[in-house]
Structures are given as structure tokens and as C-alpha cells.
Image: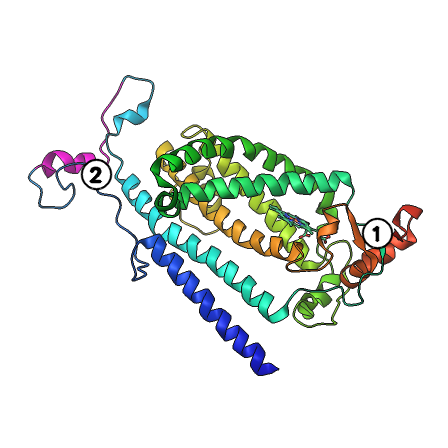
Amino acid sequence: MIWSILRRVVGTLGLALLVAYGAAAGLTGSPVVDISPVLAQTSGAPPGGALSGKSPTERIWGPIRRGVQGSVTIPDKQAATLVQSDGDNWRAFKNGPLSQFGGWLLLASIAVLIVFRLVRGQIKIEHGPSGKTIERFNAVERATHWVTASSFIVLALTGLNVLYGRYVLIPIIGQEAFAFITYYGKIVHNYIGFAFIAGIIMMFILWARHNIFDKVDLAWIAQGGGLFVKGQHPPARKFNFGQKCIFWIVILGGITLSLSGVALLFPYEITPWAATFKALNLVGFSLPTNLTPLQETQLSVLWHSLAALVMIAIILAHIYIGTPLGMEGAIGAVGEGQVDVNWAKEHHSLWVAEMMDESAGGKPRPAE
Ligand code: HEM
């Protein structure tokens, strides 16, 4: 028994590593996975081998490359900076370490879920379906869930396309189709963000009070949520500790994604970083607070991408456990709003007890 589990784990780990290697090699375009920062693209770089120390034209290009500013009378004062060298470093970081880290993170998340599935299998309703259901989420809660979830999925796909599409999609669908998808994807990304913001606000209003951490969570943590051992069902109210964590990650991650996203909708106009760094410096950081609008926008792009990658990696686990692939009987909660009473008793025993004590609406009714 133990050997067969071990064999499956080792086999799956090997497979996951192979997939991860293949994807990373694909991302970097090299069979040797190099995690050093890629060099910024050279086409479009300022002429004269700027800053090389060897160029005959460095006398002219050197100061420009170092960001020397002229003066302009047109409204866009940014035009006074001919070349912003930081942009080159920024692009190298975004297309290099950030993209590679994100690729690995997403693959790691998928690999962990595959291993979990192979070891634990589907989490079943241990006592079997009772045939009676109880209302888990009402129509407003379900609509809120799906507005947030569907907008997040569209934002994730269109956003990932901006980061990775050129590596993954161009070889498959060609440049023209990729340009079409990316052009319209960007427009969709800009507008659907507002549905996501509305969903996050609604989720907070509906569920925040059920997600305050309390001492019931300690038993859940001690037993690892009963996720790893069959027959273990720690008590929980409407949301268990794991769900509370997901909830606050969605709220806080949603807020930071929304704020940085809106800052990117109005580049050079919404500039939140100098003030953020000033506040962080009060608690011991020493971050630069004299930032140009261009640097502000560059920071927003990096932060927005990083926060999105981390959130997608976490939400993948949520999606897995919410579907029948991960857990029997959970999907009904956000589907028709009803869950089986035995499912509810196993995963949310204290909540079921509260519901039974309440009005007739909380009483179990026969499944349709
Ligand atoms: C296909 C995608 C998804 C599926 C199948 C799914 C499934 C579920 C299910 C079954 C529940 C109810 C769990 C229960 O009854 O206790 C739930 C709750 C929830 N979902 Fe989703 N979900 C999806 C996508 C998302 C996305 C993209 C977000 C946010 C960005 C999200 C945020 C939440 C939150 C905050 C809760 C309440 C806390 C929790 O159960 O973790 N969901 N989801």
C-alpha cells in the first residue's frame, strides 16, 4: 500500500518536473534553463553602444542614456527625456526574472495539485449523499461569486497572454492571429476589470463577517483541515480556516490588483508609489520617494503582474477543490445554491447546527 502510494508520488513528481522543465525551456527558448536575467532586446536600443565605454559616440549618447533631461514647451514634459535607461532594466526584469518566476509558480501550483489528486484522490462525502439538501448560498451570493470568478478568469487569460502569449501562442497560431487576440484581449482586460472590482466589493459586503478568524479555526489548523486524512472532519462555521484564507487573499489581492490596474488605465496620471514608499519608509524601509511619472508607471506594471501571478497560482487550487475533480458535492453551493446535508455536516458542522436551529428555511429539504 505504502509502496504503491510512494511509487505514484515519485512517478508524478518526475512527470511534473518534466512538464515544468519543458515549459521553462520553452519560455526561455533554451534547453538549458537559465534563470539569470535575460538581456533586454537589442533592436531599438539607442545607437552608439551607449554606456559601453568603448563607443566613439558615447560623448553624445552617454548623457542621453543616463537620462539627462532637456526642456520642451509641449504639454507632455516627459518628452524632455529622450531615453530613460531605467526602461531598459525594467524591460529586462519584466521579460526575464519576473516572467520566469511566474511561469515556475504556475507550474508548481499545477504540479502540487496533480500530486495531491494522486495521493488523496477525490475528497468524497464520507457518509454518502443523504438525499436531503440545505441552502448554502442564496442567488445574490451565487451571482456575486460568478461575476467575480468569470471576470477573474477572463482577466487572468488576457493578462497571461500579454506576459507569455508571444512565446506560447505565436509559434502555434502565428503573428496575425496573435496580434488580433492581443489587441481585443487588451480592450476586454481594460473594461472587465470593473466587473471584478464590483464583485470584490460585493463579496466583502456579503461574506466578510463570516470570515473573521476565531478559535474554531485552531482545531481546523491542527488537523490540516482533514484534507490529508480520510475520516477527519474538524468543525467549522459557514467558512473554514482554509476558505477564510482564500477569502482574504481574494479581497486583499483584489484590492491591490484593482488599484494598480486603475493606475495603469491612467498611466503617468495616477502615481501611487512615491506615497506608498514614503509610508513604508516610516516602518523601516528605505525606498526612493522621488519618482518620475514614468518610473511610477513601470512600478505599477511590475506590481500588477506579480500580484496577478501569485493570485492565479492560489486560485488554481481553489478551482480544483471547488470542482468534482477535487471534492464531491462542493460545486452545488455555487451552482444551484444547495449542498447535500451530509457534505455540510462533514465540512461545516457548526454552520449546519446553526441553520437547523434557525427558521424553517434552514431545515433540510428533499433533493430534487
Ligand atoms: C471555475 C472556477 C471556480 C469554481 C468551480 C469555484 C467553486 C467554488 C465553490 C464550490 C465555492 C463554495 C465552497 C463552499 O460551499 O464552502 C466557492 C467559494 C468561493 N469562491 Fe470560487 N470557484 C471558482 C472561481 C473563483 C474565483 C476566480 C474567485 C476569486 C477570484 C473565487 C472566489 C471564491 C470565494 C472568495 C469563495 C468563498 C470562500 C471559499 O469557499 O473559499 N472563486 N467557489
User: Residue 346's spot in the image, x, y percent?
Assistant: 78, 63
Contact (Cβ within 8 Å) of mark 1 with mark 2: no
| Residue bearing mark 1 | 134
| Circle 2 Cα neighbour tier, 10 Å, few/some/many (<14 / 14–19 / ≥20) | some
Among the 4 quarters of the image, the one containing residue 160: top left
Disc number for residue 45? 2
Residue extending farthest right: 360
| Circle 1 Cα neighbour tier, 10 Å, few/some/many (<14 / 14–19 / ≥20) | many
User: From the viewer's perspective, is 223 left or right of 237?
Assistant: left
The secondary structure type at the circle numbered 2 is loop
Point out the tag, 1 or 2, that comes first from the N-terminus.
2
Count of numbered tags: 2
Residue 69 located within the stretch drawn in magenta = yes
What residue type is disc 1 on?
A: Ile
User: Residue 124's spot in the image, x, y percent?
Assistant: 72, 65
User: From the viewer's perspective, is 193 left or right of 181?
Assistant: right
Report the front residue among 295 and 301: 301
Label 1 and label 2: CA atoms lie apart by 63 Å
Residue at 72% x, 47% y is 334
What residue type is disc 2 on?
A: Ala
User: From the viewer's perspective, is 117 left or right of 13?
Assistant: right
Q: Tell me if the residue at label 2 has its CB under 8 Å from ligand 1.
A: no
The secondary structure type at the circle numbered 1 is strand
Disc number for residue 229? none
- Residue 57 versus residue 40 in the image, above or below: above
Report the front residue among 261 and 318: 318
* Magenta span: 57-72
Q: Can residue 215 be seen here?
A: no
User: Residue 26's spot in the image, x, y percent?
Assistant: 35, 55
Please state which of the two labelled residues, at mark 1 or mark 2, is closer to the viewer.
1
Q: Can residue 152 be seen here?
A: yes
Residue 25 located within the stretch drawn in magenta = no
